[in-house]
Amino acid sequence: MATARKSVPTAWVVVLFLITVVLVFAVIRVTIDSQNIANGVIPEEGEFDHRYARYPILAYAHILPGVVYLVLAPFQVSRRFRNRHLDLHRKMGRFLVPIGIVSGVMGVLFGFFFSFGGFAEASAAVVFGTWFVIALALAYSYIRAGDTVRHRRWMIRAFAIGLGVGTIRIWVGVFQGFGLLDEVTSFGVAFWLSWTLHVIAAEIWLWRRPT
Ligand code: HEM
């Protein structure tokens, strides 16, 4: 019991760290793309930044709602926040479910059509993006049916996928930083590895805390 209680603050440290990683890369993304778009520059095809300057609407229809979802979702999964502000939890939920789904669907499209990491990244985006969208939709339908236990379980599954975006960036950094994989392969491997780990971590979390 003591271990389970101790692991909660540890989990929050991990959550905040991963969200910070995502935010740092989102800021870098916006900085690069806004300069490219303002100057009418589209980087060469094959360069990482090419797709973001070439298809900014699709890219930002994914990134912007994704960032809002990821920044606000921790409040939603926090028991303390829910207990103190249940009405706000409900209002935020009605807003976060659709924007999470929009981000997920756009992420699947961007990954499927314009992945940097080829088939491996595209397939991971389709598999885990679909899982993310289904998890949010199920979580919503369960709370409409008054089933708070299943609602919580599916929300945690969705949140774990959202957090996986930070882990992906860390693995890409490790693979490229240590020269273990080339640029393209590192993305495909990092996408599969990170989201698989996050799905497993979420299931372990739910197994240890079923209600
Ligand atoms: C929900 C929280 C999410 C946030 C905050 C988020 C944020 C981002 C950001 C900032 C980027 C740009 C990456 C960079 O320039 O380094 C990105 C790219 C991408 N995201 Fe997400 N994302 C989220 C969820 C997802 C999900 C669920 C999917 C699954 C389909 C997904 C698929 C992708 C893909 C395929 C890319 C393109 C990577 C590339 O450049 O090849 N994201 N996302």
Image: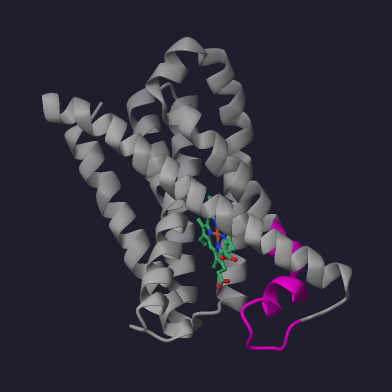
Q: In this view, does 41 lie above or below 195?
A: below
Query: Residue 65 location in percent, x, y?
Result: 65, 47
Q: State the quadrant of the N terminus.
A: top left
Quarter where residue 12 is shown: top left
Kindly identify the residue that appears in the image at 72 percent across and 88 percent down: 44
Tell me if 176 is positioned left or right of 22 in this view: left
Magenta range is: 43-60
Q: In this view, does 101 lie above or below 190?
A: above
From this viewpoint, is residue 104 visible?
A: no
Quarter where residue 53 is shown: bottom right
Tell whether position 122 is magenta.
Answer: no
Tell me if 121 is positioned left or right of 40 in this view: left
Q: Where's ligand 1: which quadrant?
A: bottom right
Kindly identify the residue that appears in the image at 63 percent across and 51 percent down: 102
Tell whether position 56 is magenta.
Answer: yes
Query: Residue 105 location in percent, x, y?
Result: 59, 58
